[in-house]
Amino acid sequence: MEKPFIHLLSSINGFYFYDVNRNEIVNVDKDVYDFLIKLLNDEEVIPNKEVKNKVSELKENNYLSSNTIKEIKHPESDKLEYHLDRHIDQITLQVTQNCNLRCSYCAYSKFDNLSQRNRSNKDMSIETAKKAVDFLLQHSSDSDKVVISFYGGEPLLKFNFIKEVISYAQENFIGKELSFALTTNATLLTEEIMEYSINNNLDIMISLDGPEEIHDLNRRFADGTGSFMKIVENLQKLKNKYGDELKNILRINTVMDPKNDLDKMNTIFENEIFKGLPVSSVIVENFFSNEQTVYSNKFLEKYFYQIFIGILDLIGAVKDLNTYPLIASVINAIYTFEENMTVAKGLPEVGAPGGPCVPGKRRLFVAVDGEFFPCEKVSEVSKVMNIGNLDNGFEVKKADDLLNIGRLTPVECKKCWAFRKCNICARKLEKEGKLSGDEKLSMCGDVRASVEEDLKKFILLKECRTIYKI
């Protein structure tokens, strides 16, 4: 029997394999599981009649195929020029590279780091901004909804500039659903800004890392003082005036430093000012830094316990569970993963690992000088990540290279069981000015471990519903 393209998993309740071709988790008896282990490990094994019949039945139902991708090519490759010419959904304007805070984990504050730009006083000119709006208009013909987002630095340092850009866009975008977004540290938020945001469909994401003693560890003004109390003062004024209407405009993003106490971080949401506001969270990332992210054991224990609580809440196992807002995005990701476990007939002849978005289509980042990058998370000093500019348009070949990072490691990708679920992004693959296959391969172990964890959570959901009937 040929070696099937599967990955084996088990729980306290049963034995399973993930069928890569079918994108499906399959429950099997232990004798079949043991046979498949030996088969995958190239051990000599002769199944007994009972196992042979069970395996034959699985194969008759199109499981245990050894089929793999024959050619690595992203399915959107042939449509890339179309997407960039007519189907851009969002642009993010880098309003300024200046900021009134000096956050300790900010990539732009690491002056000893050559892999990212440094903080500067550069601002985007209104001519560049209008040119970017025109570019979006010309290249979004087939997008029903478009978003213009404002980013920094701290974009509210240039609020009048933002208003001028929004007015210009509103005058020129006819027949499309147009909305705006802004990411801010909230120290400059005023009633005037909120009133304008409510009236002009401007969604505001504010950065808040926890209560004062945690938030102020990292997010400080240039003079070293903490920013928490100023944010609270601003939001209290807005809460007094707008009440629950804030829920439609404001969102909170928390950067969780895993050296800190998760329980303490979450106490911020007991404050009436923040109750009910949508929350997302990320773990602090030091990719553009020489520092390593340090996880305390207490943080990890509490983090995974809260995920467990969140899963119980997701399946409705226990009434009135108090789940942490900071874990909401993790639980949403589990739900999204479950939705994406759609059974397939098999792998196509031509395909690519999951992970890369279509560079420039989803949220084209326009730097202060009009240079193009796939999004705001990549290095702005990278020639690899620079995919064009306002004067000359897109460099489609460079965008295609970012889309097709699977071509860097075709042999390994074709045989990887995590092929469908891979989340490697090109932004982490640059080495000496080029996309590196070695850098990509160095990430594969962590990716497979992450995908396996996601599959185990999926199995837990299935077992809760079938075995425990909840």
Image (spheres, rainbow, N blue to C red):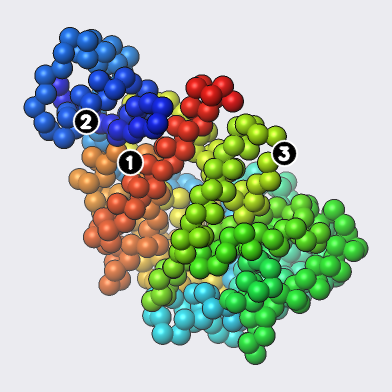
Instruction: Tell me the residue that label 1 is attached to.
Output: 419
* SS under mark 1: helix
Q: Is residue 227 visible in the rendered structure shown here?
A: yes
Eyeballing the image, is 127 above or below 196? below
Q: Position of residue 65 (x, y in %)?
A: 25, 24
For residue 320, which numbered disc appears in the image?
3
> Which quadrant of the figure has residue 225?
bottom right
Residue appearing at x 23%, y 26% in the figure: 34
Which class describes the residues within 10 Å of circle 1: few (<14), some (14-19), or many (20+)?
many
Mark 3 or mark 2: name the one nearer the start of the chain.
Answer: 2
Name the residue nearer the viewer: 331 or 70: 331
- Label 1 vs label 2: CA separation? 20 Å
The disc labelled 2 sits on which kind of residue?
Answer: Ile
Name the element at disc 2.
helix
Q: CA distance from mark 3 to mark 2?
A: 42 Å
Residue at 74% across / 64% down in the picture? 166
- The answer to the question of whether label 3 and label 1 lie on touching residues, with beta carbons closer than 8 A, is no
Between 323 and 241, the one lying in front of the other is 323
| Circle 1 or circle 2, nearest the eye | 2
Task: Classify mark 2: residues with Cα within 10 Å, few (<14), some (14-19) or many (20+).
Answer: some
Write the residue at 57% across / 39% down: 311
Give the mark toward the camera: 3 or 2. 3
Q: Which mark is on residue 209?
A: none
Query: How far is disc 3 from disc 1 in space, using C-alphas?
Result: 38 Å
Q: Position of residue 119 (x, y in %)?
A: 54, 82
Give the image quarter of residue 20.
top left
Q: Nearer the viewer, residue 205 or 314?
A: 314
Q: Which mark is residue 37?
A: 2
| Residue type, mark 3 in image | Asp
Task: Estimate the x, y position of residue 57 in percent, counting from the top left.
Answer: 28, 11
